[in-house]
């Protein structure tokens, strides 16, 4: 996992609640191996029409958002299917942070395991960020995982909470399986108590 | 037990019993009794291979392919797309290499993993179960903590037989009262989602309670628990009772003989203690629930079949109005219109939500002696090979086929179309599945979620119709 400490990047506004993982990556791409570039499938049906032509009403198609590294979205982002491909697609497309009022639980867990930081903020904060990003397409947001704070385009700071262990893993680029296997003695002890 | 132990919920009791260790930050390492594996798991096995890690306890895992299998044939070579075929065959290879028991296409026990697990007695009360699929909550119907997880966590379970988790908050959903004719478990859970919202249970484990839930069959309880994730919940479960025990008795992997009596005695202590505290309580009156249909692109956008779509002026904000307009455009519907009467092109009866024998019986009872409307393509996809055989023993397949339904083989099929069973762009499907997301059943597909009886009625009428009025002359 690539470590993440600070990021200062263009943020793309994706307003609206319940952006589900079927929209983030349609099911017809799930058979692709992890070695594929899932950026090609990110928001495929929101980005392109049935003929494969770019939709002009989708923010990611606007030149101002080229190279964006942060998504600001509505509530319940990543709800639905457990497909980790949704996280891979955002990651492969260069995104390291998603800011939203709430996340689907499984998406949230998947994100933390792939170096994608989900940042929960009050709806009012998200609405303010969305407004600024629409006013100034291509504006940047700064996210500091060390300080657990973000700075919007208007310079206003806002703190965020994150699970301490997840933060540690993100900062160091650590992998949970190695960590758990280092404690295999505890698992063995537990297994001996099972019938 | 010491007197100062506070009363515990069903969830709490199972959870406490599975904690391997607890970290200072509040996360617990939870032991996983049972791991169900399906054909979307290739990336997780690949993660293990890259690290040269073995599967820790292969005997606790069971595998069956469901997402990529063809439903018009049992021949894996019939999967035209090479990558999809590779997914279905990778599971057989990965299972064999790891020593995991595998029910393949040549085995009648193959089917949707959430139908097969309970059917085989692989899922028992008091277990903690994990599966790399969001509809894993289904198994909570047996009094199990059942967790849907992503590929990295599947790899973690394969390698360690554990998961790191924060204990979720507890929500109790109580449904009381009798259900009317043709009002089913599906209508109950759609009504719950309508009330609580698609993110209403995020971060929670739901316990379903009340007389309506108790009176549901085990199959019905699975339908309810299955859609817990559509409320955002981490898990959904129901206290096991005599009905649960009778349903499990004699299943192939359930305990037998003296072990059975001992197991039941343990399961009887699982129900939550009186006075156990829930973080949130929700109550519904079953008498107010009628056959329910979704109109939009989130399962929370559900309305009684007797009702009308919301009006734009009902939206609570400009952004909600904008979203509603967009959804109506995608669905090809008008604000405020009646949902009954909307013409449909497809009917899909199946999925981990409604692909069990009781669902097929319910649909067949509506279809019996009738014909599928001209121009409608109607499918029945049993949830497992054994459900299919049971239905054929009862003659249900003849009822369906005589009416013009296609009678297919077990798999996830048109619920999400990963195997190529898709709804064409712009076409409308009356579906017994669990998600009406944009593009869920294929690019541009329009999904209306409903019960098997309602989907069967839609097939006959060629439009969304109140199953209670079908054949009474009152059909509009």
Image (spheres, helix red, strand yellow):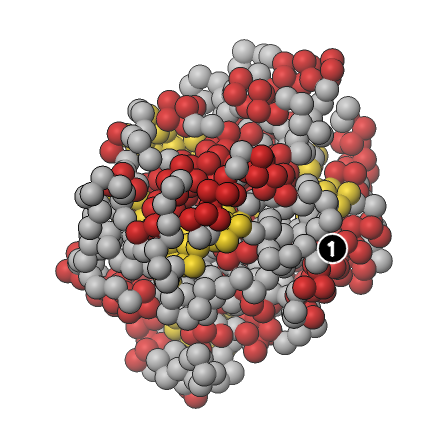
Above or below for B87 versus B134: below
Q: Is residue A33 above or below residue A187?
A: below
Residue at figure coordinates x 25%, y 67% from the top left? B325
Residue drawn at x 65%, y 69% is B80
Furthest toward the bottom, the residue is A63
Q: Is residue B245 visible?
A: yes
Q: Nearer the viewer, residue A101 or B382?
A: B382
The image shows residue A118 at horizontal and vertical percentages of: 51, 61
Q: Is residue A173 above or below residue B395?
A: below
Q: Is residue B170 visible?
A: no
Q: Along the horizontal axis of the image, is A17 left or right of B320?
A: right
Residue A106 rendering spot, x and y as whole percentages: 54, 52
Chain hosting mark 1: B
- For disc 1, the neighbor class at 10 Å (few under 14, some 14 to 19, many from 20) is many
Q: Secondary structure at mark 1?
A: helix
Count of numbered marks: 1
Residue occupying image coordinates x 74% and y 55%: B91
Describe residue A4's horizontal placement relative to residue B397 as left or right: right
- Residue B441, image x, y percentages: 47, 61
Comparing A176 with B128, the one in front is: B128
Indicate the quadrant where residue A46 lies: bottom left
Q: Image quadrant for the C terminus of chain A?
A: top right
Q: Residue at the location (56% across, 52% down)?
A: B408
Viewer-side residue, B306 vs B47: B306
Label 1 belongs to which residue? B91
Locate the N terminus of chain A by quadrant.
bottom right
Quarter of the image for residue B268 reads top right
């Amino acid at each position: 996992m690539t470590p993440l400490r600070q990021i200062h990047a263009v943020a793309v506004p994706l307003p609206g609640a319940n952006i589900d993982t079927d929209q983030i990556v349609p099911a017809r791409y799930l058979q692709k191996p992890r070695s594929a570039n899932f950026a090609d499938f990110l928001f495929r049906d929101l980005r392109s029409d049935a003929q494969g032509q770019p939709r002009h009403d989708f923010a990611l198609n606007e030149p101002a958002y080229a190279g964006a590294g942060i998504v600001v979205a509505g509530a319940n982002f990543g709800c639905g299917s457990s497909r980790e491909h949704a996280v891979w697609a955002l990651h492969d497309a260069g995104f390291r942070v998603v800011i939203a009022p709430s996340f689907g639980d499984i998406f949230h867990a998947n994100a933390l395991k792939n170096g994608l930081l989900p940042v929960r903020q009050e709806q009012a904060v998200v609405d303010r960020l969305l407004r600024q990003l629409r006013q100034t397409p291509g504006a940047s947001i700064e996210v500091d995982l060390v300080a657990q704070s973000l700075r919007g385009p208007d310079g206003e700071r806002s703190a965020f909470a994150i699970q301490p262990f997840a933060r540690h893993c993100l900062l160091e680029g650590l992998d949970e399986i190695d960590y758990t296997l280092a404690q295999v003695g505890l698992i063995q002890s537990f297994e001996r108590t099972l019938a | 037990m010491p007197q100062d132990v506070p009363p515990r919920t069903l969830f709490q009791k199972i959870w406490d019993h599975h904690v391997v260790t607890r970290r200072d930050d509040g996360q617990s390492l939870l032991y996983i009794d049972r791991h169900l594996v399906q054909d979307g798991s290739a990336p997780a096995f690949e993660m293990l291979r890259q690290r040269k890690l073995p599967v820790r306890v292969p005997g606790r895992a069971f595998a069956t392919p469901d997402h990529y299998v063809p439903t018009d044939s049992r021949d894996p070579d019939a999967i035209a797309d090479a990558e999809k075929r590779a997914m279905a065959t990778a599971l057989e290879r990965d299972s064999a290499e790891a020593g995991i028991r595998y029910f393949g296409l040549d085995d009648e026990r193959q089917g949707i993993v959430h139908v097969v697990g309970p059917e085989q007695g692989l899922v028992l009360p008091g277990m903690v179960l994990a599966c790399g699929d969001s509809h894993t909550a289904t198994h909570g119907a047996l009094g199990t903590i059942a967790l849907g997880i992503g590929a990295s966590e599947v790899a973690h379970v394969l390698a360690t037989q554990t998961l790191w988790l924060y204990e979720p908050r507890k929500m109790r959903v109580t449904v009381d009262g009798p259900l009317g004719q043709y009002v089913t478990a599906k209508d109950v859970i759609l009504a719950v989602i309508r009330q609580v919202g698609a993110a209403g249970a995020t971060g929670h484990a739901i316990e379903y309670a009340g007389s309506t839930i108790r009176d549901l069959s085990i199959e019905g309880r699975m339908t309810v628990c299955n859609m817990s994730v559509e409320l955002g919940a981490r898990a959904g479960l129901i206290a096991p009772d005599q009905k649960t025990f009778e349903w499990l008795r004699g299943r192939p992997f359930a305990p037998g003989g003296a072990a059975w009596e001992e197991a039941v005695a343990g399961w009887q202590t699982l129900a939550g203690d009186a006075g156990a505290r829930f973080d949130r309580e929700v109550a519904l009156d079953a008498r107010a629930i009628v056959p329910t249909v979704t109109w939009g692109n989130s399962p929370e956008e559900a309305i009684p079949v007797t009702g009308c779509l919301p009006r734009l002026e009902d939206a609570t904000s400009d952004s909600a109005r904008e979203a509603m307009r967009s959804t109506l455009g995608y669905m090809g519907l008008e604000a405020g219109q009646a949902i009954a009467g909307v013409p449909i092109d497809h009917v899909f009866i199946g999925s981990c939500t409604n692909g069990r024998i009781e669902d097929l019986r319910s649909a067949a009872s509506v279809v019996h002696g009738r014909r599928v409307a001209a121009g409608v393509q109607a499918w029945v996809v049993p949830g497992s090979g054994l459900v299919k055989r049971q239905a054929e023993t009862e003659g249900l397949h003849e009822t369906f086929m005589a009416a013009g339904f296609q009678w297919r083989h077990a798999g996830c099929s048109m619920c999400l179309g990963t195997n190529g069973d898709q709804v064409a762009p712009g076409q409308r499907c009356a579906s017994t599945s669990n998600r009406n997301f944009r593009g869920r059943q294929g690019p541009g597909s329009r999904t209306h979620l409903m019960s098997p009886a309602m989907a069967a009625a839609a097939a006959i009428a060629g439009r969304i119709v109140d199953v209670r009025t079908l054949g009474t002359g009152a059909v509009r």
